[in-house]
Image (tube, rainbow, N blue to C red):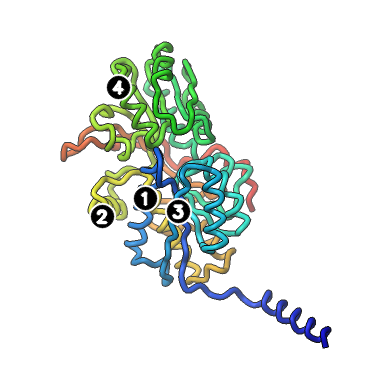
Amino acid sequence: MITGIKKTVAGALMLAALAPAQAADKVKVGMLSTLSGPGAGLGVDIRDGFQLGLKHLGGKFGELPVEVVTADDQQNPDVAKQTAERLLKRDKVDFMTGVVFSNIMLAVGPSVFAARVPYVSANAGPSQYAGEQCNPYFFNVAWQNDNLHEAVGKVVMDKGFKKVVVLAPNYPAGKDAVAGFKRYYKGAVADEIYTKLGQLDYSAELAQARAAKPDAMYIFLPGGMGINFIKQFVGAGLSKDVTLFGPGFSADEDVIRAVGEPMLGMFNSSHWAHDMDNAANRRFVADFQKDYGRLPSLYASQGYDAALLMAAAVRDVKGRIEDKPALLKALKAARFESVRGPFRFNSNQYPVQDYYLRVIGRDGQGRVTNKSLGRIFSNHADAYVSACKMP
């Protein structure tokens, strides 16, 4: 009798294992981002951009309603890892997105990939996941960390600056930033300064930069770090003799709102700008201002595109998100209308895209904001793709 029961149970388990996964009746998205501390503005912009995308989609991906589970990683890798585990195991999310900082992404990535949950990065683009640690479950809808820095390096070189000081936080994206800048800037780097991530007082670094007597300075300081640095840079009088350059995320609307006029004349690079003239972008920028009362930043544009990419993939698999091979294929196809114009993934699932030069000036309404000047790179790929052996 006991043997018969065991056989019945074993048979039932085998049939359950062979049965197709139950079709989803909704899509759950884990929005894990930095929503407190000096980097909070970046996470808030990603979240708000994503929510606007979801609003434009009628609250659905394809025919499935969407539930967003939002959590704060507190810009702490340990907190982020624990929270990601909760989103994956307790909340059973179908997608994840939202991480701002690359050290956080590297901390949560292994858990996400092990759970076979697609991660759509709306910002963090570490070189590790572009190269040898590339993963079929990781899609970056923003850029690879080095790319915006490579673009500025080319501009600084082309403009003939001879002596540059570079400054970045001492964490993975900071190292990628300097590597990217130096990949295209071949002039003299007078000093290479690394700071603590989250540092807000730069008096010692400004004195160090002044002593080097550069004709230009390149910074990568996102969020509150950039806000404080630029205020202190101008206050110390360095802006009179040193031209300041940065990537878009050190000179975007979040920083401009906090710093204002001292940023006039600063050059930066981006793959997106609010003055891009295409239908998707005009709608995004107008509705973001209407809903949130501010100009969107590139972080917001990336959050918006992350929502549209997920929606396109769910639509293309006709809601069968339990079919992971089909879902991954649909994500890689990227059949959505990006606010930056044409969009496609490289073989490592990072974008191949154009990069532009922007300068901070006044617009027709007198606002201090970015103005596009022209294209730096066309169809630019990252430097790590050849190391990705993903089939």
Q: Would residue 37 be found to the left or right of residue 320 on screen?
A: left
Q: Which residue is mark 3?
A: 71
Alpha carbon of mark 1 to alpha carbon of mark 4: how far? Answer: 35 Å
**Percent coordinates x, y for residue 189 in the rendering:** 48, 18
Q: Residues within 10 Å of mark 2 (few under 14, many from 20)?
A: few
Q: As shown in the figure, which amino acid type bears the numbered disc 2?
A: Asp
- Rounded to the nearest angstrom, the CA distance separating label 3 from label 4 is 36 Å
Q: Residue at x 42, y 37 (%)?
A: 377
| Left or right relative to 101: residue 56 | left
Circle 1 sits on which residue?
Answer: 341
Q: Nearer the viewer, residue 308 or 252?
A: 252
| Residue underneath mark 2 | 291
Q: Earlier in the sequence, mark 2 or mark 1?
A: 2
Residue drawn at point x = 47 percent, y = 74 percent: 25
Q: Which mark is residue 234?
A: 4
Which of the marked residues, 2 or 4, is nearer the chain's N terminus? 4
Depth check, mark 3 against mark 4: the one in front is 3
Mark with earlier residue (1, 3):
3
Amino acid on which the number 4 mark rests in the picture: Val
Instruction: Name which of mark 3 and mark 2 comes first in the sequence.
Output: 3
In space, the residues marked 2 and 1 are separated at their CA atoms by 23 Å
What numbered label is drawn on residue 17? none
Q: CA distance from mark 3 to mark 2?
A: 22 Å
